[in-house]
Image: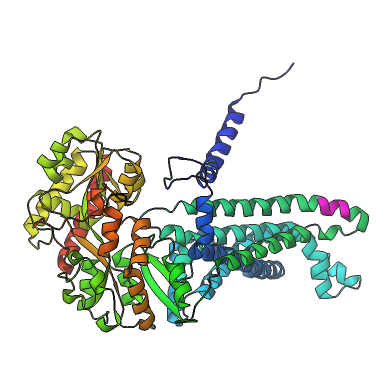
């Protein structure tokens, strides 16, 4: 009589497999998406694969990721295996102690390990870059190899090496022909874990790298404004590479086993697949390096320009075109906040160009980190829009050349929000219970307090603690009674899909949203807003200021500014580009978010005040705590 089998186990297994593999399948499908959306499939296209191949930054990151992983795996496997064998012959007290030491890096939080490596390299004045990343990866991979090899060694007869030498083997032959073949499965397992850990690592890599060296995880993290859909393409490529490696590892031993019966070389059955995998991955790295190469011209041939900019804040072609025209190599590092950029600059890291925001430029000038610009080397000043020149944070543009500019306003769904409500209430619409549970707040203390202060009729640059407290109470009411969701750049794709009625957003992101969804609108309350600008500056410790001037001129000229603005969606500082993109037939025709408002006396430029910033930062943390408690 057949036993009744409960289907629960099978169902659970199927759901587990779906849980693990559905996101990967989703990613692969959207790598062929024709549009920029990460959630809406608009048609089949290989556009993002072409973009991936054309992106020197992404291909370089792919090359760095695999080359570091391969080298770190090989070295850590050798060291880990030798260490494990040595420990097996050590005294028990030493073996137990070393096992605990080996477990510590694996149990330790990655952030602690990362900071430790960073401080180590800083202390010994080792310039951070590819080598420091590789050393860190080797160090954190070794414990995993030891952990994988030790159980295999424990299962061996402790006298096997002695027996081999009694039969005439040398110590080296006893190691390589008697011990290693027996523990090869553990070695392969440790190598695979080391490779996986290296490929996957972000935190440690982020803290120990420099000079523009990035792996894929860092590239994804620094896409601060929106995730470039080409990352789906490069991620799919990584999945394909790993799948091929796994197929080789699993199939090659079967083939080798059949050959062993004929050739009596069974001991090589693990060597063949490992060698094949390493060769395949090295071939990919070489291919990526060749694909990432760019032709060079004469003016600055052999020179390197180091730029520190926001993630996803440059056009598709500007860097490659500049390199072709000048012969220079551009190393682009990315930050996701002005404060992150400031820390690196204050710690003495050298860049040729920075792209900070207005208030941070004011701070950098006051603290002496920037050099005055030689206007005789600039041919772009007459091409800039008057609305973004000679601003309060840098009168006469003595230190900065505008890059992008815009406003902060309300993105709203025209099918859900009455425009009359916006005109009547302004920012106070975020307290209108008609839209309860249907709003986004932007996770930025500066912009959120700007909204609250403007809603109350105050200056966004107020130093009056009573007014700041009122703004805090306004935000508390918003998060406690309106069931509002505090988000960062996910607001871009979410509003493009119409998931909520309204939210606070930067004008450039609103431009993208409106281009993707015709039902979206952008509104600036009459009570005023933050008229912001990001600009290019040259630090005092820049190593190549002449090349920096060349890039500033190139990025401010028509072609460079057009490529930047049309791709990113933020308003170009070049007047002709702004007019062409917004005119009839232009890419942003009819999108009011693209044209910054310049005729409202209530609009302000943010001013840096350290004391006020500390107060607002503390209060915003309390707002976020209140928001999480309200859910």
Picture coordinates of residue 346, whole percent (x, y): 31, 76
Q: Is residue 379 left or right of residue 51?
A: left
Considering depth in this image, is 139 or 47 the residue closer to the camera?
Answer: 47
Q: Residue 488 in magenta? A: no
Picture coordinates of residue 41, whole percent (x, y): 46, 40
Quick one: quadrant of the N terminus? top right
Q: Which residues are magenta?
A: 255-259
Picture coordinates of residue 440, whole percent (x, y): 26, 44
Q: Is residue 212 left or right of residue 376?
A: right
Q: Residue furthest top?
A: 1
Picture coordinates of residue 76, whole percent (x, y): 63, 68
Residue 223, can we see it? Answer: yes
Q: Is residue 179 left or right of residue 151?
A: right
User: Is residue 9 positioned above or below 134 on the image?
Assistant: above
Q: Is residue 228 left or right of residue 4?
A: left
Considering depth in this image, is 220 or 253 the residue closer to the camera?
Answer: 220
């Amino acid at each position: 009589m057949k036993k009744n089998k409960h289907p629960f186990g099978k169902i659970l297994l199927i759901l587990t497999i779906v849980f693990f593999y559905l996101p990967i399948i989703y990613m692969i499908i959207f790598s062929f998406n024709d549009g920029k959306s990460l959630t809406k499939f608009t048609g089949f296209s290989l556009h993002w694969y072409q973009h991936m191949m054309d992106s020197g930054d992404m291909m370089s990151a792919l090359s760095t990721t695999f080359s570091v992983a391969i080298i770190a795996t090989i070295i850590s496997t050798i060291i880990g295996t030798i260490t494990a064998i040595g420990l097996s012959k050590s005294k028990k007290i030493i073996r137990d102690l070393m096992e605990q030491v080996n477990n510590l890096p694996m149990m330790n939080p990655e952030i602690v390990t990362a900071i430790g490596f960073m401080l180590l390299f800083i202390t010994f004045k080792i310039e951070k870059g590819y080598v420091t990343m590789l050393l860190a990866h080797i160090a954190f991979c070794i414990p995993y190899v030891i952990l994988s090899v030790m159980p295999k060694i424990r299962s061996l007869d402790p006298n096997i090496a002695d027996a081999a030498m009694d039969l005439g083997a040398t110590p080296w032959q006893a190691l390589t022909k008697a011990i290693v073949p027996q523990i090869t499965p553990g070695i392969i397992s440790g190598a695979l874990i080391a490779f996986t850990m290296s490929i996957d690592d972000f935190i440690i890599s982020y803290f120990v790298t420099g000079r523009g060296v990035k792996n894929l995880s860092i590239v994804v993290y620094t896409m601060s404004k929106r995730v470039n859909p080409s990352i789906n393409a490069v991620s799919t490529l990584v999945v394909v590479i790993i799948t091929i490696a796994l197929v080789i590892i699993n199939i090659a031993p079967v083939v080798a086993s059949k050959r062993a019966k004929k050739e009596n070389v069974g001991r090589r059955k693990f060597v063949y697949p490992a060698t094949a995998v390493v060769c395949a991955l090295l071939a990919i790295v070489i291919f990526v390096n060749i694909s990432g190469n760019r032709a060079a011209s004469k003016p600055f041939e052999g020179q390197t320009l180091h730029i520190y900019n926001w993630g996803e804040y440059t056009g598709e072609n500007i860097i490659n075109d500049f390199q072709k025209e000048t012969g220079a190599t551009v190393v682009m590092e990315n930050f996701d906040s002005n404060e992150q950029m400031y820390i690196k600059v204050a710690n003495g890291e050298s860049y040729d160009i920075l792209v900070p925001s207005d208030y941070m430029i004011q701070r950098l000038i006051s603290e002496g980190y920037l050099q005055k610009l030689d206007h005789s080397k600039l041919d772009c000043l007459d091409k800039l829009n008057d609305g973004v020149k000679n601003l309060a944070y840098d009168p006469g543009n003595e230190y900065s050349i505008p890059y992008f500019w815009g406003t902060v306003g309300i993105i709203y769904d025209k099918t859900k929000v009455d425009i009359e409500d916006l005109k009547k209430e302004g920012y106070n619409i975020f307290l209108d219970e008609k839209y309860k549970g249907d709003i986004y707040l932007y996770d930025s203390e500066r912009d959120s307090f700007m909204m609250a202060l403007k809603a109350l009729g105050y200056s966004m640059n107020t130093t009056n603690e009573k007014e700041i407290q009122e703004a805090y109470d306004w935000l508390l009411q918003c998060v406690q009674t309106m069931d509002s969701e505090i988000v960062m750049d996910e607001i871009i794709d979410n509003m493009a899909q119409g998931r909520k009625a309204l939210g606070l957003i930067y004008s450039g992101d609103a431009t993208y949203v409106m281009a993707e969804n015709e039902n979206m609108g952008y509104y600036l309350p009459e009570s005023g807003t933050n008229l912001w600008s990001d600009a290019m500056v040259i630090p005092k410790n820049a190593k190549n200021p002449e090349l920096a001037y060349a890039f500033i001129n190139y990025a401010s000229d028509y072609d460079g500014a057009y490529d930047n603005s049309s791709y990113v969606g933020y308003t170009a500082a070049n007047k002709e580009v702004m007019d062409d993109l917004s005119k009839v037939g232009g890419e942003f025709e009819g999108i009011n978010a693209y044209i910054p408002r310049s005729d409202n006396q209530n609009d302000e430029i943010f001013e840096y005040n350290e004391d006020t910033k500390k107060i607002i930062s503390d209060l915003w943390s309390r707002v976020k705590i209140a928001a999480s408690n309200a859910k």
